[in-house]
Image (cartoon, helix red, strand yellow):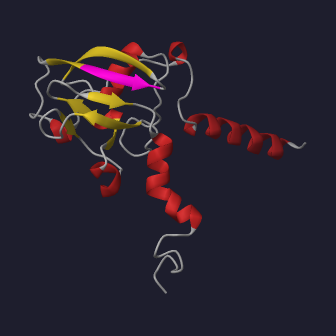
Amino acid sequence: MNALSVLILVCFLVSAQCFAPSFQARSMRTPMRMGVPLELEGKLDPSKTWEIELTLDGVTKMVTVSEADCVLEAAEKVFDDPPFSCRNGVCTTCSCRIVEGKEGENYKLAVHGLGETALSQGFTMSCQTHVTGPGVKIELNQYDTVYEMQYGQYEKGTAKDTKKSFFGF
């Protein structure tokens, strides 16, 4: 292998590590405090805390969460490996489903990358969801369901516009 091939291989391996979803053990992660998103500034009271129920892969735990903390941060307190990747509401790795609670009353959403179908069925992203009332129950690790809902139709070729090119010609 020549030097250029080695350099390209090293660059590929480094970039793959940078963009891989964070499914590593909690002890290997750097703790990260997210803070209140700009979209929710002034709409949350960090002094208020709520008891919520989180379920991850069939294991249910109760946790107390401040309105300033997102559901993902609450999950990291009680579970060793809650799924996430970007923490910015884009990748959908941290997708979850609200089992009990109503948007605007029991929880608020910041930015999100989910479609209306997913949102209407109670799906959201744990990194962008802040609890603002009692009685919230959440099922974590809903990535596969959300992915299928959002993108599966295109993979199967059942979307209405799959025959058109990118520019509609």
Question: In terms of image quadrants, where is residue 134?
Answer: top left
Viewer-nearest residue: 31 or 84: 84
**Residue 115 in view (yes/no):** no
> Is 4 placed left or right of 120 in the picture?
right
User: In the image, residue 120 lies at what x, y percent?
Assistant: 27, 51
Q: Is residue 102 one of those drawn in magenta?
A: no
User: In the image, residue 34 lies at what x, y percent?
Assistant: 31, 27
Q: Which residues are magenta?
A: 52-56
> Is 72 placed left or right of 23 in the picture?
left
Q: Residue at x 36, y 39 (%)?
A: 88
Viewer-nearest residue: 132 or 156: 156
State whether residue 83 is above or below residue 32. below
**Residue 87 in view (yes/no):** yes
Question: In terms of image quadrants, where is residue 54?
Answer: top left
State whether residue 101 is above or below residue 68. below
The residue furthest bottom is: 169
Q: Residue at x 76, y 41 (%)?
A: 9
State whether residue 169 is above or below residue 90. below
